[in-house]
Amino acid sequence: MADDPNGPQAIRKLLPGKLVIASHNPGKVREIRALLGPYGVEPISAADLDLPEPEETGTTFIANAELKAMQAADLSGLPALSDDSGLCVDALLGDPGIFSARWAGPAKDFDLAMASVWQKVEAAGPGASRSAHFVCALALAWPDGHVEAFEGRVDGTLVWPPRGGNGFGYDAMFQPLGHAISFGEMDPEAKHAMSHRADAFAKLVAAVF
Ligand SMILES: O=P(O)(O)OP(=O)(O)OP(=O)(O)OC[C@H]1O[C@@H](n2cnc3c(O)ncnc32)[C@H](O)[C@@H]1O
Ligand SMILES: [Mg+2]
């Protein structure tokens, strides 16, 4: 659809240009800025624009990403990139999943959220699987309502106690497959080489840039 004026190719005409990062999570905004680094866009965060945090009423990562991006594009009049992501734990049948932020409560306490995850995994029994994966849905929306979404994933194992002070959210309790350190112990560049966010971003880049 290279000729569709509302399609993903339209971003070419906006580059170098402004792009709203439709997230209120500073950890995500930092990672998305790094991923966008080589593409000559000027990222502005939702917080810079004082955009409201929409209610995440979707039942999938993609649906929530789309509603966040569409609201930011509509309110700002600029293309907007959102991220809906979370940790899915096999022993918890995919929880916390799309509720990953909500498990941290209004205080956004991820020590508490990680402890809740681990407590529930232990309660599932000594033989319960420690397998988990992160999912990231990235949605890119234009002010005319057009939206494109891409999903990425990284598989790993839960570790306890949490390890490392890098990253954010559940990073300290997640060790990606094939690695001996947690995301919390990894340099940002190493996480960007394999994360769910990088996987989704690669798909977005292939389709859009
Ligand atoms: O909705 P926005 O404003 O983007 O920010 P949020 O923190 O509410 O984000 P989500 O609704 O997508 O919730 C996903 C949660 O999952 C966690 N999460 C997502 N990606 C992660 C990552 O790369 N490392 C660790 N935790 C992550 C993180 O704690 C998020 O708060
Ligand atoms: Mg959220």
Image (cartoon, rainbow, N blue to C red):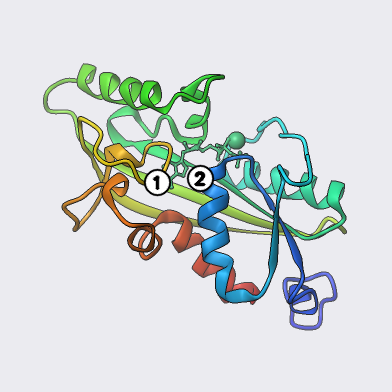
Q: Which mark is residue 27?
A: 2
The answer to whether residue 131 is left or right of residue 85 is left
Of the residues shown, which amino acid type is indicated by label 1? Gly
Q: Earlier in the sequence, mark 1 or mark 2?
A: 2
Residue 160 lies, with reference to residue 39, above or below; the image says above
**What residue is rendered at 83% in x and 55% in y?**
145
In which quadrant of the rendered image does the C terminus lie? bottom right
Q: Is mark 2 within 8 Å of ligand 1?
A: yes
The yes-or-no answer for disc 1 within 8 Å of ligand 1 is yes
- Residue at 40%, 24% in the rendered image: 113
On the image, numbered disc 1 is attached to which residue?
167
Do labels 1 and 2 touch, CB within 8 Å? Answer: yes
Q: Quadrant of residue 142?
A: bottom right
Image coordinates of residue 161 in percent, x first then y, are: 20, 30
> Which quarter of the frame holds ligand 2?
top right
The amino acid sitting under disc 2 is: Gly
Residue at 78 percent of width and 40 percent of height: 51
Callout 2 environment at 10 Å: few (<14), some (14 to 19), or many (20+)? few
- Tell me residue 172's x, y (percent): 30, 39
Crowding at mark 1 (Cα within 10 Å: few <14, some 14-19, many 20+): many
The Cα–Cα distance between marks 1 and 2, rounded to whole angstroms, is 7 Å
The quarter of the picture where the N terminus appears is: bottom right
Mark 1: secondary structure: loop
